[in-house]
Image (cartoon, rainbow, N blue to C red):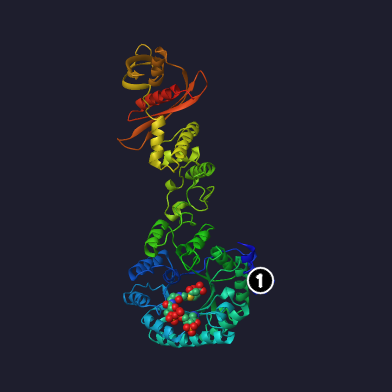
Amino acid sequence: MKPSSIRKYVPFHRRFSIPLKDRQWPDRVIEQAPIWCSVDLRDGNQALAIPMNIEEKLEMFRLLVQVGFKQIEVGFPSASQTEFDFLRRLVEQGEIPDDVQVQILVQAREHLIRRSFEALKGVKRAIVHLYNSTSPLQRKITFSDSSKDDIKAIAVKGAQLVRQLADEAEAEGSEITMEYSPESFNDTEIDYAIEICEAVMDVWKPTVERRMILNLPATVEWTTPNVHADQIEYFCRTVKGREKVWISLHTHNDRGTGVAATELGLLAGADRVEGTLFGNGERTGNLDIVNVALNMNSHGIDTGLDFSNLPHICEVYERCTRMSVHERHPYGGELVFTAFSGSHQDAIKKGLDRRKKSAESDPVWEVPYLTIDPEDLGRTYEAIIRINSQSGKGGVAYIMDTEHGLELPKSMHPEVGKIVNDEADRQQKELNADEIREVFEAHFVNLSKPLSLGEYELFHQTETPGMVRCIAQVVYEGKELQIEGTGNGPISAFVDAIEHQGWKNFRLTDYRSHSVGKGSASNSAAYIQLQDVDNGRLLWGCGIDTSIEIAGLKALVSAFNRLQHKPA
Ligand SMILES: CC(=O)SCCNC(=O)CCNC(=O)[C@H](O)C(C)(C)COP(=O)(O)OP(=O)(O)OC[C@H]1O[C@@H](n2cnc3c(N)ncnc32)[C@H](O)[C@@H]1OP(=O)(O)O
Ligand SMILES: CC(C)C(=O)C(=O)O
């Protein structure tokens, strides 16, 4: 920003300060979950270019119930016919489970309050959420230089009507909880915000048994999260009758610290949190409730919210809101359980391997780079490691193992990793599991040039037990030949046959094999490492075949063929 522009902005502490000298929140830890309230269908919905239609709202409502929300703000029924009709549909069609309270938002204006209660007729349990803006900025601009008393009067008058209509609804069998928000609380002089809230409390007369909710919105996030925490702690310690109210947080994310502000607000004494899935909401969004809840889970706190099928939740959310979850979005983003870079892949693979062995004896999650087990969110390990030109050998080996059942010997990893990595670099893109296998096969498996193996027979030598003789049909540099050799196994017999031809320029330095897949269709994979006697180069080859014997020979031939390609 240019210096001339910077002069437009005033530091928050020059506008207000919070008279809190002995703040306690920095020494606290979060030990239990708050009461959660989803505002997806109201604050989230009002921020959409195309608001959800009734069917979409219904689908989201059912999803939110499934996740475990017990308080759901379903709309602003006095704002439009769709909002009104949606609430009627929930009430009339018995969509609201008995343990769920639907919440509605309304401005402190008579006709809107009356219309809201019409929409609530017959509801079993509801929260009526009344608000008016209280900040100096809104008093000046929105309410045309209204005084503090004028604004307080709007709140009190609205509260009186809500009290009266709530009493009438309760007489007809509904249970109404009341909520008040001094909108832009975080931008309002703190003692004045308390004064208005106490005035509303005087009208609603909450008790310890029947509390009301005081929601303290950071309608626009102006400050660092510690200031928010100070505001909440000061409010909690100062408001009269604290024990008769649930203190609720409602943060936005204008500075990108909505989650932090909520977490510090909880340390500061709040009981309740309003937010939306993935933080959809006005401007930069509301608080991301998935983020805060899963942060708690990752510290061993049960939240009552179940995000164990996060991919499904993302899918419904994206379809209904027409928004998308960013690839890097905490927990939900496509790339957040993925490592492209080699050292991360290596550490994750080691962590997951160790965990496979010790998960039962040691349940504590300890995998480098992963704060949470992706499986706990319905995400799979397969998606964790992905391969591009920044990837390392560990990641490639992990994909070959988990996706294709090929357990490459550890000393083969660098060779395979480099070739796959070079290919990703050459193509300038990420390689998927099938493409990685293609690269692996093209460079390592059943290679047939210059030598290829045809028919092959093995004879056990009765005169020297343990020795076998092989007769193999091969093609070498385009010529068909029959070669023969003897050894203490099929591989050494074949090596002997190669030696008789005068082609042997190697030592066999390693051999591994394992079966791939289960049942009659299973294959065997064999890996052979040869060393070039002239220059000491070590190269692996792989053979895959239904016969373990032939797989071994093909691995030998593959490694032999790789050795014939001299480095440039
Ligand atoms: C921070 C938040 O997210 S708050 C929730 C915001 N959500 C929405 O606004 C979505 C739904 N809203 C709507 O559909 C409409 O704005 C309605 C139905 C609420 C009101 O509609 P209208 O009265 O036609 O228009 P509008 O919202 O522009 O009203 C402005 C008037 O309300 C007054 N007003 C604004 N907020 C409040 C309030 N909280 N309490 C009382 N009056 C208010 C303004 O001062 C202004 O009065 P004026 O005309 O005398 O200057
Ligand atoms: C109405 C209030 C709670 C609100 O949405 C806000 O201040 O952001």
Q: Which residue is mark 1?
A: 13
In this rendered view, identify the residue nearer to me: 448 or 525: 448
Mark 1 within 8 Å of ligand 2, using the beta carbon: no
Residue 16 shows in the view: no
- Residue at 42% x, 57% y is 310
Q: Point out residue 457 in the picture as x, y percentages from the top left corner.
A: 31, 19
Q: Point out residue 436 in the picture as x, y percentages from the top left corner.
A: 41, 38
In this rendered view, identify the residue nearer to me: 365 or 476: 476
Q: Residue furthest top?
A: 463
> Disc count in the image?
1
- Quarter of the image containing the N terminus? bottom right
Name the image quarter holding residue 325. bottom left
In this rendered view, identify the residue nearer to me: 285 or 266: 285
Name the image quarter holding residue 81. bottom left
When the figure is inspected, residue 262 is found, relative to residue 546, above or below; the finding is: below
Q: Residue furthest right?
A: 21
User: In terms of secondary structure, where does tag 1 sit?
Assistant: helix
Q: Tell me the kind of residue under disc 1.
A: His
When the figure is inspected, residue 515 is found, relative to residue 186, above or below; the finding is: above
Q: Point out residue 225 in the picture as x, y percentages from the top left corner.
A: 60, 66
Name the image quarter holding residue 488. top left
Q: Residues within 10 Å of mark 1 (few under 14, many from 20)?
A: few
Q: Point out residue 345 in the picture as x, y percentages from the top left corner.
A: 50, 43
Residue 536 shows in the view: yes
- Residue at 51% x, 18% y is 534
- Residue at 37% x, 25% y is 554
When the figure is inspected, residue 413 is found, relative to residue 254, above or below; the finding is: above
